[in-house]
Image (cartoon, rainbow, N blue to C red):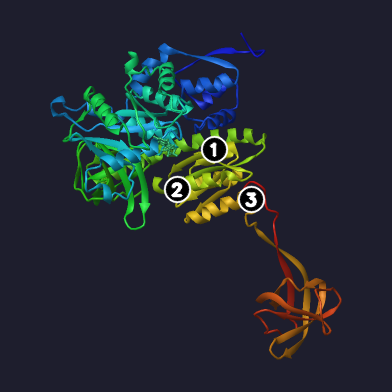
């Protein structure tokens, strides 16, 4: 077969494949694959699974035509992809099961309107009286429609891909796939659809931005049909709702459709059963300690329960609903923010209620042991790939950033203001923006893409710091947004305050002290080596110890002001802020030189 003169090789790929394995199959560097994915807006690390569609796109760019090895993988997925919480509910006594509100996640290509839609739904549908009070984002919220509750996961739109498996499709009963009517189906739309399918989560499509003059609903439907989402009015089984998130049009229809789909599913749980759920997001609050947003998926979470999530655990001291109101109980499908964990759990992690803190501790100890082993194994693999990449260096035409922040609420304004800086000669390219501490993964992505990591109110993990050091990756931490944007702006202009380096110009020995009224003591000196300059600084050294420092305020040869005076000459030196000279003091003259500012990196 030939394509522009190049032969296209046929390969078969499974429904999901790790980047490492894909690299082997198509005989490419994993780093090149990571870069290709980044260019398509997908962030992934070497051990991450990507779905067939994504793998096929990458493969095709590298001269391969991929087909799905259908049979083998379908079966594996059916079991493997059912999230643990669903399996736990399946084990509950059917007689105890009751309906619970559907949990919905909104996914789609960047800029297609996910955030706008989440905000629009929140503001128009949260029960009256509450809406005004909602100032915080806990990562999830609930709305009421026709007297029924719907839970929305307010997941970061930008990071939807990586976060999705963990947070989105796994925790959700239903995915609303947002597609902009003017832009149509894009790579991330396909990716989201594929993930939702892999997780067996039904997809409802919201065609957004129908208010736009260039909106083309028909074209979008055509594209949807092409990726297997055939609209219901085209005899398919995908419900498609046209909306305008911006003008808040069609929102009722969308909520209606969500409930309709929910009614045809078995969305239930046992409120009296085993308490389990998913960590939606978590952070450290200065006043409240660890605050974790938990989505209860089975059982009823109560204040006083001992919660275990990964290696974080603790007795719940207080619990708040998404409006910030204190609650004592949280039935299934309720998102709550809880206080009392001893550590920040990872978003996407399962949590469970255990008998006692002692039980929790024991389980945590076991888990730590296993994760340590896994970590060392992963680390080795990563470093090797990194080494590979270091041989190739590309032209940097843009400032690439990986942005990590403590909460979604601060991530958004940061990303927005950074995007705005892009107008100059060099663009800001935010490769990845997510909440949470800076991890080794971030450093790896930075290394693969030549990016700088920016952290806001977060820390870099110890392992991440080590890796950054060895990889020469710059990590910048901030706690003031203004400083962050200012630094990035400076970096863009190649004007970032460079490091100051000290350069010693020469030494003079104090041989006499002259008292001059109004000026104070002036040191009569002999220049022993180098030179003394007027626009420089002096360090006063006595018996080997520095006893004072200041700028040269006057430099005279005999009675004449001079700019500099060389070795072997005598001079009078006055130092700003210091005049307690003694005969025998050594005056070391130095300047602070700015290192050459680098052009497009920090
Ligand atoms: P996200 O990246 O998917 O979360 O997209 P955003 O919600 O940030 O929206 C991206 C841009 O599209 C923003 O400038 C929104 O104001 C705009 N937008 C979102 N929904 C609509 C809509 O229904 N109509 C129009 N005209 N613009 C919209």
- At 69% from the left and 56% from the top, the residue drawn is 595
Q: Which quadrant of the rendered structure holds the N terminus?
A: top right
On the rendering, which quadrant does ligand 1 occupy? top left
Q: Which residue is mark 1?
A: 445
Element marked by disc 3:
loop
223 to the left or right of 271: right
Q: Nearer the viewer, residue 595 or 22?
A: 595
Residue 41 has which mark? none
Q: Position of residue 29 (x, y in %)?
A: 60, 27
Density class for disc 3 (Cα within 10 Å; few <14, some 14-19, many ≥20) is some
* Quarter location, residue 184: top left
Q: Position of residue 562 (x, y in %)?
A: 81, 77
Between tags 3 and 1, which lies in front? 3
Image vertical order of residue 579 relative to residue 477, above or below: below
Residue 493 has which mark? 3
Q: Position of residue 38 (x, y in %)?
A: 54, 32
Q: Which residue is mark 2?
A: 413
């Amino acid at each position: 077969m030939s394509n522009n003169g190049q032969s296209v090789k046929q390969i078969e790929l499974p429904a999901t494949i790790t980047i490492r394995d894909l690299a082997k199959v198509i005989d490419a560097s994993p780093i090149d694959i990571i870069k290709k994915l980044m260019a398509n807006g997908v962030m992934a690390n070497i051990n991450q699974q990507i779905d067939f569609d994504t793998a096929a796109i990458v493969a095709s760019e590298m001269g391969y035509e991929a087909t799905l090895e259908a049979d083998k993988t379908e079966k594996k997925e059916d079991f493997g992809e059912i999230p643990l919480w669903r399996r736990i509910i399946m084990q509950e006594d059917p007689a105890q099961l009751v309906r619970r509100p559907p949990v919905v996640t909104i996914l789609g290509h960047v800029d297609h309107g996910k955030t706008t839609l989440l905000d629009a739904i929140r503001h128009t549908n949260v029960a009256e009286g509450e809406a005004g009070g909602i100032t915080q984002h806990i990562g999830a919220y609930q709305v009421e429609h026709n007297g029924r509750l719907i839970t929305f996961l307010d997941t970061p739109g930008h990071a939807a891909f990586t976060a999705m498996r963990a947070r989105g499709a796994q925790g959700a009963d239903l995915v609303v796939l947002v597609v902009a009517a003017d832009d149509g189906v894009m790579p991330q739309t396909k990716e989201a659809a594929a993930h939702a399918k892999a997780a067996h989560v039904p997809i409802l499509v919201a065609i957004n931005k129908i208010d736009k003059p260039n909106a083309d609903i028909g074209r979008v439907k055509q594209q949807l049909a092409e990726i297997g989402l055939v609209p219901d009015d085209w005899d398919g089984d995908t419900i498609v709702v046209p909306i305008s998130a911006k003008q808040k049009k069609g929102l009722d229809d969308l909520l209606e459709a969500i409930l309709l789909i929910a009614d045809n599913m078995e969305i239930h749980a046992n409120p009296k059963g085993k308490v389990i759920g998913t960590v939606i997001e978590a952070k450290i609050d200065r006043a409240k300690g660890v605050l974790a947003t938990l989505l209860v998926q089975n059982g009823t979470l109560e204040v006083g329960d001992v919660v275990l999530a990964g290696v974080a655990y603790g007795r719940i001291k207080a619990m708040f609903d998404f409006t910030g109101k204190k609650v004592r109980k949280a039935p299934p499908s309720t998102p709550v923010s809880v206080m009392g964990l001893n550590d920040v759990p990872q978003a996407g992690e399962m949590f469970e209620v255990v008998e006692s803190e002692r039980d929790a501790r024991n389980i945590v100890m076991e888990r730590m042991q296993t994760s340590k082993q896994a970590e060392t194994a992963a680390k080795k693999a990563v470093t090797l790939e990194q080494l590979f990449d270091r041989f190739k260096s590309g032209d940097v035409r843009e400032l690439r950033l990986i942005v990590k922040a403590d909460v979604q609420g601060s991530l958004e304004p940061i990303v927005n203001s950074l995007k705005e800086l892009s107008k100059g000669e060099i663009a800001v390219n935010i490769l990845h923006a997510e909440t949470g501490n800076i991890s080794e993964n971030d450093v790896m992505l930075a290394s693969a893409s030549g990016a700088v990591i920016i952290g806001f109110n977060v820390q870099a993990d110890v392992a991440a710091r080590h890796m950054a050091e060895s990889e020469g990756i710059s990590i910048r931490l901030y706690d003031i947004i203004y400083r962050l944007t200012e630094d990035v702006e400076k970096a863009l202009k190649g004007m970032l305050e460079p490091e100051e380096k000290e350069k010693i110009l020469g030494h003079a020995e104090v041989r006499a002290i002259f008292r001059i009224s109004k000026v104070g003591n002036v040191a009569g000196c002999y220049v022993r080596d180098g030179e003394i300059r007027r626009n420089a600084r002096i360090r006063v050294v006595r018996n080997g110890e520095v006893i004072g420092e200041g700028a040269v305020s006057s430099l005279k040869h005999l009675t004449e002001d001079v700019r500099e005076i060389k070795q072997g000459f005598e001079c009078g030196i006055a130092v700003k802020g210091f005049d307690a000279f003694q005969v025998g003091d050594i005056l070391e003259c130095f300047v602070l030189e700015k290192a050459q500012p680098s052009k497009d990196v920090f």
